[in-house]
Amino acid sequence: MTKSEVFETCQHHGPVPILRKEPAEPRYIDHFDARTLESALELLRRYGAAAKIIAGGLDVIGLMRKQVIAPQVLVNIKTVPGLVYTTEDAEGLKIGALTTIRDVETSEAIRQRYPILAEAAHAVGSPLVRNMATIVGNLCQDVRCWYYRRSPATGPSFFCRRKGGHECYAVDGENAYHAIIGADQCHAVNPSDMAPALLALRASLKIASPSNDRVVPLAEFYRPMGNILQPDEIITEVQVPAPLPGTGQCYLKFRVRQTIDFAISSAAAVIVTRAGVASEARIVLGGGSPAPYEAFDAEATITGKAITESLAEGAARAAVGHATPLAQNAYKVPITEALVKRAILGCLSDQT
Amino acid sequence: MLGELIPVVLRVNGDDYEVGVKPVETLLDVLREKLGLTGTPMMCDEGECGSCTVLIDGKPVLSCMTLAVECEGKDILTIEGLADPATGELHPLQRTFVERSGMQCGICTPGMILTAKALIDGNPDPTEDDVREALAGNLCRCGNYPRIAECVLAAAELMKGG
C-alpha cells in the first residue's frame, strides 16, 4: 500500500500514520479466576505487565478487541469475595473496588450525603453498562481517542505517542472530541464521570500490592498518559472523606445523546458555604483533558466570597482561562464554561 | 491450558450446557456459535447498542462484553427462554410486542424485551418515565421508541393480571 492509499483508507487529514509493525493480537491468553486478593496479587507479581486485571470487563474487552492491548493473562477479580460494599460513618464513605456504578447510583447513603457521586454514576454509559461497570474500572478506564483505539482490523492503526510513538495524530487530525485544556503530549480526554466527582470530594484510593498497601489521593493518581498504578497492584477501595456541614455538590455532563455517550464536557463542583461565604471550593472538569482537570483559578475566584450569578460566571471564565482548543473543538470551551457556572450555582440549591 | 478450550457449564434458560470456550470468547459468541441460540443478535459488538442484552442472575447486561468463561454458575436468560417451554405460549412482553407492533426491523427487540422484563420484575407498576429510563441503553434504529414504551406498559398491566 502506498502512502497516499493509506491516507485515503483511514480518512485521516493529518500526517500519514506510522503503521504498527507487528499485530498485537496474542496467539493465546490464559484466564484465571482469582479466589482471594492474595492469589490475584500473586498472579500479577508472576506475570507482571503481561497480565491484565478484568472486572466489569467493558474497557478491557474493548481494548483487546481493538488490539490496543494484548495481555497474555487475564486475572478475573470478580471472584474475589469482599470487594463489593458501600459503608459510611462519621469519617466518610468507603466503596469496595468491585461495587458497580449501578450500586453507587442507587445507594441511599450516597444519594443522601454524597449526591454528586449518585449524579455522576447516573451519567455513566447506559443502564446496561452501569449494571456491569465497577467504580474502580470507571476510574481506570483508558481513553476513547479514535486514533488510539483504532483497530488494525479496520485499517491502519496509529502508533501514537500514547503507545510509545512520536506523534499525537489528533493535533492535526480529526479532533472534535479531543482535549481543550491541560494537554501536552497526548490530546485524548479522560472519559470518566466518577473521577471529576470523586476528585472534587477529595477521594483517595486504597491500593494493594504484594509488598504493602498504600493510600493515594485521587489528585495524585492520574498522569497525562494514564495513571500511577503499577502492574502488580490492585485498587481495592475508594475512600471519600465526609463532607463538611453546608457542603453543596453538583455534577453536570454535556453530551449529544442523554444516554450511552461519553462526556463532551463535564463539571463537578463541591462548595462549602459558611455564613453565606464560600469557605472552600473544588471545581473539576471532565471530558476536556487527558486527566481530570482541577480548575484552581475558578476555585480561587469564588473562595472567600458570597456566590452570585456574576461571580459564578467569572469563575467559569477562569476555569477555561488556560484552554487551548484544537482546530475542531473550540465549541467545547463555551460548553465547559456554561457547565462550570451551572455547577457552581447548582451547589447553592443542593446542600447536604 | 495455553490456547486450549476451557470446559465450562453454562446454565442458559434453565438448561445446563457443557461447552469448551476460549478464554476471550464472549458470552454472545458462545450463545450464537456454540449453543445455536441465535435469538441474541450481534450488532455493535462494543457494548454500545444493547441489542445483545441477556439477563444474568436477573440483571440485564451486555453479552458482547461478558466473557463466557466468567459465566459459570450463573443463571443466564436469553429471549429463547421467555416463552413457556411446555406450551410455547409467549411471555406477555412478547405478546404485546407482536400485537402492538413493538418492532419494526426486530433487531433490538430481544434486548428491549429482556431489559423490560428485568424492569417489570423489579417494579411491577412502572411509569412511562421508568420505562424510558430503563431502556436508555437499548438503541432502536427504526426509532420505534414510543411504541416500545407503550408495549412495555401494556405488558406490565397484563402481568399484574389487569
Image (cartoon, rainbow, N blue to C red):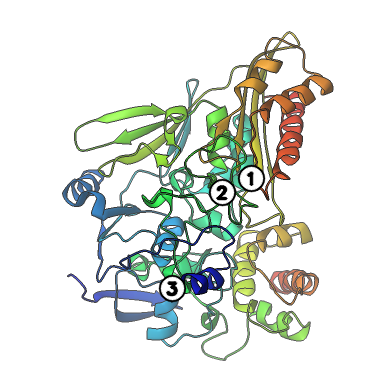
Placement of B1 over or under A306, stated as above or below:
below
Q: What residue is pinned by disc 3?
A: A153
What amino acid type is highlighted by mark number 1? Leu
Left or right relative to A277: residue A51: left
Q: Return the disc, 2 or 1, that comes first in the chain's sequence.
A: 2
Which quarter of the picture shows residue A196? top right
Q: Are marks 2 and 1 on the same chain?
A: yes
Residue at 60 percent across and 73 percent down: it is: B111
Q: What residue is pinned by disc 2?
A: A171
Whole-percent x and y of residue A114?
A: 59, 31
Q: Return the disc, 1 or 3, that comes first in the chain's sequence.
A: 3
Whole-percent x and y of residue A220?
A: 42, 28
Image marks 2 and 1: residues in contact by CB distance under 8 Å? yes
Left or right relative to B63: residue B19: left
Q: Return the disc, 2 or 3, that comes first in the chain's sequence.
A: 3
Q: Quadrant of the C terminus of chain A?
A: top right
**Discs 1/3, front:** 1
Q: Chain of mark 3?
A: A
What amino acid type is highlighted by mark number 2? Val
Which quarter of the picture shows residue A207? top left
Label 1 element class: loop
Left or right relative to A220: residue A171: right
Q: Are marks 2 and 3 on the same chain?
A: yes
Q: Which mark is residue A326?
A: 1
Rounded to the nearest angstrom, the CA distance separating label 1 from label 3 is 28 Å
Q: Chain of mark 1?
A: A
Q: Quadrant of the N terminus of chain A?
A: bottom left
What amino acid type is highlighted by mark number 3? Ala
Q: Is residue A35 visible?
A: no
Label 3 element class: helix
Rounded to the nearest angstrom, the CA distance separating label 2 from label 1 is 7 Å
Whole-percent x and y of residue B61?
A: 51, 64
